[in-house]
Image (tube, rainbow, N blue to C red):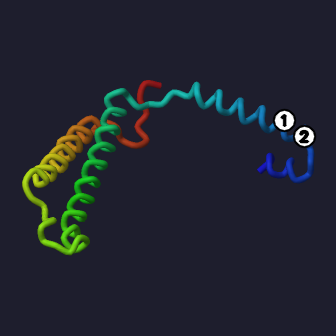
Amino acid sequence: MPVIYSLSIGSREHLNTSLVFMMAMTDRALEYRHNLRKHEILGLLFLFFAASLFGLGLYLIMWGANRPIFYGSLDYLLNGKELLLFPLLFGTAAVLWALGSIELREATPGKRRGE
């Protein structure tokens, strides 16, 4: 709030010092080392992509179920190659979820390593 306060009063000195302080904070934040290992970051990415694929699969199921109602004809039911999307999306999501959980097995919250 110091920046908003200095703008309302018109004090430029306070604004300049707060901006310098915020720039120093970002430099310090860039130097901060985290305790996640590379395989744990990879596990988090696996879980993110697995959840994304699962959500996309659910969306396609809902759209496939409502498509005949939307277009008003049973000709728009899911058929043929569209049915292959479900095992592809849900199977890939399940494999990525399993791999991500294996990679994150050692990453317990609050665990201090290597300090």
| Closer to the camera in the image, 114 or 61 | 61
Q: Which amino acid does the dot numbered 2 rest on?
A: Arg
Toward which corner of the image does residue 80 lie, by quadrant? bottom left
Residue type at tag 1: Asn
Q: Residue at x 77, y 36 (%)?
A: 19
Residue 51 in picture, x, y percent from top left: 29, 49
Q: Residue at x 24, y 65 (%)?
A: 62
Locate residue 104, reporting x and y percent: 30, 38
**Residue at 27% over, 53% down:** 56
Q: CA distance from mark 2 to mark 1?
A: 6 Å
Number of residue marks: 2
Q: Secondary structure at mark 1?
A: helix
Query: Residue 16 got which mark?
Result: 1
- Of 64 and 111, the residue lying toward us: 64
Residue contact between numbered discs 2 and 1, judged by CB atoms under 8 Å: yes
**Image check: 48 left or right of 81?**
right
> Which residue matches tag 2?
12
* Residue found at the far left of this picture: 80
Residue 26 or residue 114, whichever sits in front: 26
Q: Residues within 10 Å of mark 2 (few under 14, many from 20)?
A: few
Instruction: Indicate whether 110 appears above or below 4.
Output: above
| Secondary structure at numbered mark 2 | helix
